[in-house]
Amino acid sequence: MSIKKKVCLIIVIILLVASIVGIILKNTIFNPWVTNKDYLYEAAVNAIIAEEKEKSPDRNVSGFHTFASFHRFGVQKGSNSSEKIVYVWINYQSYYVESDQIWKSTGGSHPYKVTFSNDEFVKYEIPNSGGNYQNEIRNLFPDKIEEDIINYNSPENLRNMSDDIKNQVNNYEEYEKIINKEKE
């Protein structure tokens, strides 16, 4: 084997090893996305609902309950090993009971950036809904998911989330009793 062929073979082997090492590093050390923290989505939704309940003027009315539907965009490593950031779209709606009827209360639908430390809720951020909405999303969310979030804000997706909430309301036992009482 000539010297040129040996050098080429060595270069190919070095490039192959470097590529394999690069792929491994990209998928482990340098990958900010976390795949084994799906329970944080539920924790994020619960934290948002708890804050919503505290702010609602109807929170002390009989039968007050908040229902939510959400879409997952990803969980990312934070600035330190204990911090995780959850990216999720949450659509929520509160209801209460008055005069044996179910009434809508407060609600909302936003993409959220929710920060956790040691799996405990720390804070959330949402984009301002002014004329700079898309720029707000681009500033708040990672490049990898910003287009997904912008595109998720469609009438069809939001209607599907609202329909999910309506199904939750229809299947909520306390409200089922009220509806069945009305039919009697």
Image: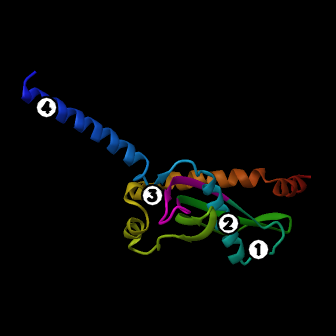
- The residue drawn where x is 60% and y is 60% is 91
Residue 84 included in the magenta stretch of the image = yes
> Residues under labels 3 and 1: Cα distance?
30 Å
Of the residues under marks 2 and 4, which one precedes in the sequence?
4
Quarter occupied by residue 16: top left
Query: Label 4 neighbourhood size at 10 Å, few (<14), some (14-19), many (20+)?
Result: few
State the SS at label 2: helix
Instruction: Kindly identify which residue carries mark 4.
Output: 8
Q: In the rendered structure, which amino acid carries the disc numbered 4?
A: Cys
> Residues under labels 4 and 3: Cα distance?
46 Å
> Residues under labels 2 and 4: Cα distance?
62 Å
Query: How far across and down, in percent of the image, does residue 180 sit?
Result: 87, 52
Q: Nearer the viewer, mark 1 or mark 4?
A: 4
In the image, is residue 69 above or below residue 16? below
Q: Are marks 2 and 1 in contact (CB under 8 Å)?
A: no
State the SS at label 1: loop
Q: In the rendered structure, which amino acid carries the disc numbered 1?
A: Arg
Q: In the rendered structure, which amino acid carries the disc numbered 3?
A: Ile
Instruction: Kindly identify which residue carries mark 1.
Output: 59
Q: Are marks 1 and 4 in contact (CB under 8 Å)?
A: no
Of the residues under marks 4 and 3, which one precedes in the sequence?
4
Pick the quarter of the image with the N terminus: top left
- The residue drawn where x is 84% and y is 57% is 174
Q: Are marks 3 and 1 in contact (CB under 8 Å)?
A: no
Magenta highlight range? 68-86
Disc assigned to residue 149: 3
> Residues under labels 1 and 4: Cα distance?
73 Å
Q: In the rendered structure, which amino acid carries the disc numbered 2?
A: Ile
